[in-house]
Image (cartoon, helix red, strand yellow):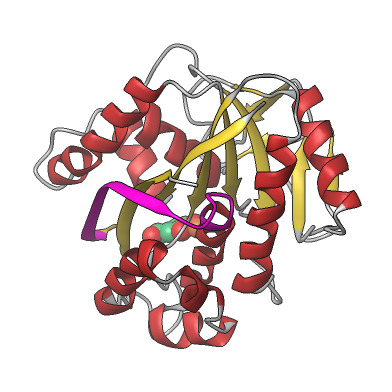
C-alpha cells in the first residue's frame, strides 16, 4: 500500500530560486535562510520518499488568464520548467508518475472532488523553489512528483476548509494504490506577504507563528480561517497558505513536528517551513 508518511510546508519566494541559481547562497543575506532549511533538507535526504505530491500554485505561467482551474492534477510523464520572463530556472525537468496521478484523479473525482486533468504543462517557481529547498541542486530530482495546482491567483480561491477536506481525500486515494510507495506531500506558498499596492511588504509574524503552531495543535482552527482573514491580517498573497491545509489534511489526525524554521524577510515575504510526520 502507498502511504503518506509526512508533509512539508514551505514558502516559494522566487528570489530564493534566484539565489540558488546565481550562487548567492553563501552571501550574508541568504546564508541564514539556507542554514534554516538544512534540517528539513537532511530529513528529506534520509527519508528518501518515492513520490512527492506537490500542492502548489501556478503564477499565470502554465495556465494563463483564459483558463484557471481551482484544483488540477498533472498526469504527464514529465513537466518542463516554465520561462517566467528571464529564462527557465536551470533545474532538471520534473519526472511525473502518470499511472499514480491518474489513480489519484479517479479516486478524488469519485469522492466528489472535481479535479481538472492536465496532460501537459510546465511548472514555475511555485513548484521549483520548494523542490530546490527540499532536495538541493541535484543533476536529476531524486523523486517522481505529482503536481497538484490550486488557484490562489484569481478570486475566488478555494476555502481553507475545502483544501483540508481535499487533503483527507488524498490520504484515502493514496492508500488505495497497490504499490508500496513512501509519499511526502508538500503544502507551499505563504507565509504572510503582500507584493502589491499600498500595503506591499506587509508581514504578520504573530499570524505566521500561530499558523505553524496550530498545524500540530489545532488544524481545525486553521481550516476555519475565512479567506478574507488571510488577506486582511497577513497580506493578499497569504491566501497561498490554504495550500498548507491540503498537506495537513493528508497527514491524518496526529502529527509529530520534526523541524521548523521562520525568518523575515526574504525579498518582501515572511519565509517559513515545517516538516510534520504522520502518526496516524
Ligand atoms: C514574491 C512572492 C511570491 O509568492 C510570488 O509568487 C512572487 C513574488 C515576492 O516576494 O517578490
Ligand atoms: Fe507566490
Q: Magenta span has 250?
A: yes
Foreground residue among 197 and 212: 212
Whether residue 187 is situated above or below residue 3 in the rendered picture? below
238 displayed left or right of 40 = right
Foreground residue among 64 and 73: 73
100 displayed left or right of 252 = right
Q: Which residue ends up furthest to the top in the rendered image?
A: 139
Foreground residue among 4 and 55: 4
- Provide the residue span drawn in magenta: 248-265
Give the x, y percent position of residue 24.
Answer: 21, 34
Whether residue 220 is situated above or below residue 101 in the rendered picture? below
Residue 111 sits in which quadrant?
bottom right
Please, what is the dominant secondary structure of the magenta stretch?
Answer: strand
Give the x, y percent position of residue 108.
Answer: 81, 49
Whether residue 4 is situated above or below residue 198 in the rendered picture? above
Whether residue 144 is situated above or below residue 222 in the rendered picture? above
Number of marks drawn? 0
Q: Which residue ends up furthest to the right in the rendered image?
A: 110
Amino acid at each position: 500500500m502507498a502511504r503518506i508518511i509526512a508533509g512539508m510546508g514551505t514558502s516559494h519566494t522566487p528570489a530564493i530560486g534566484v539565489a540558488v541559481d546565481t550562487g548567492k547562497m553563501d552571501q550574508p543575506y541568504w546564508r541564514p535562510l539556507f542554514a534554516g532549511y538544512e534540517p528539513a533538507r537532511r530529513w528529506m535526504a534520509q527519508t528518501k520518499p518515492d513520490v512527492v505530491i506537490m500542492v502548489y500554485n501556478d503564477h499565470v505561467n502554465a495556465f494563463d488568464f483564459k483558463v484557471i482551474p481551482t484544483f488540477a492534477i498533472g498526469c504527464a510523464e514529465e513537466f518542463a520548467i516554465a520561462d517566467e520572463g528571464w529564462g527557465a530556472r536551470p533545474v532538471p525537468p520534473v519526472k511525473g508518475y502518470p499511472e499514480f496521478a491518474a489513480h489519484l484523479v479517479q479516486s478524488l473525482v469519485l469522492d466528489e472532488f472535481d479535479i481538472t486533468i492536465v496532460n501537459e504543462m510546465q511548472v514555475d517557481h511555485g513548484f521549483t523553489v520548494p523542490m530546490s529547498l527540499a532536495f538541493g541542486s541535484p543533476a536529476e530530482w531524486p523523486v517522481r512528483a505529482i503536481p497538484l495546482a490550486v488557484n490562489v491567483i484569481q478570486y475566488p480561491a478555494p476555502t481553507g476548509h475545502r483544501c483540508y477536506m481535499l487533503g483527507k481525500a488524498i490520504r484515502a486515494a493514496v492508500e488505495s494504490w497497490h504499490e508500496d510507495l513512501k509519499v511526502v506531500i508538500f503544502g507551499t506558498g505563504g507565509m504572510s506577504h503582500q507584493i502589491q499596492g499600498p500595503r506591499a511588504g506587509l508581514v504578520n509574524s504573530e499570524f505566521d507563528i500561530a499558523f505553524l503552531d496550530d498545524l500540530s495543535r489545532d488544524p481545525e482552527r486553521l481550516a476555519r480561517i475565512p479567506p478574507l482573514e488571510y488577506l486582511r491580517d497577513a497580506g493578499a498573497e497569504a491566501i497561498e497558505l490554504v495550500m498548507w491545509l491540503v498537506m495537513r489534511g493528508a497527514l491524518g489526525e496526529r502529527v509529530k513536528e520534526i523541524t521548523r524554521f521562520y525568518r523575515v524577510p526574504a525579498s518582501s515575504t515572511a519565509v517559513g517551513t515545517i516538516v510534520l510526520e504522520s502518526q496516524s
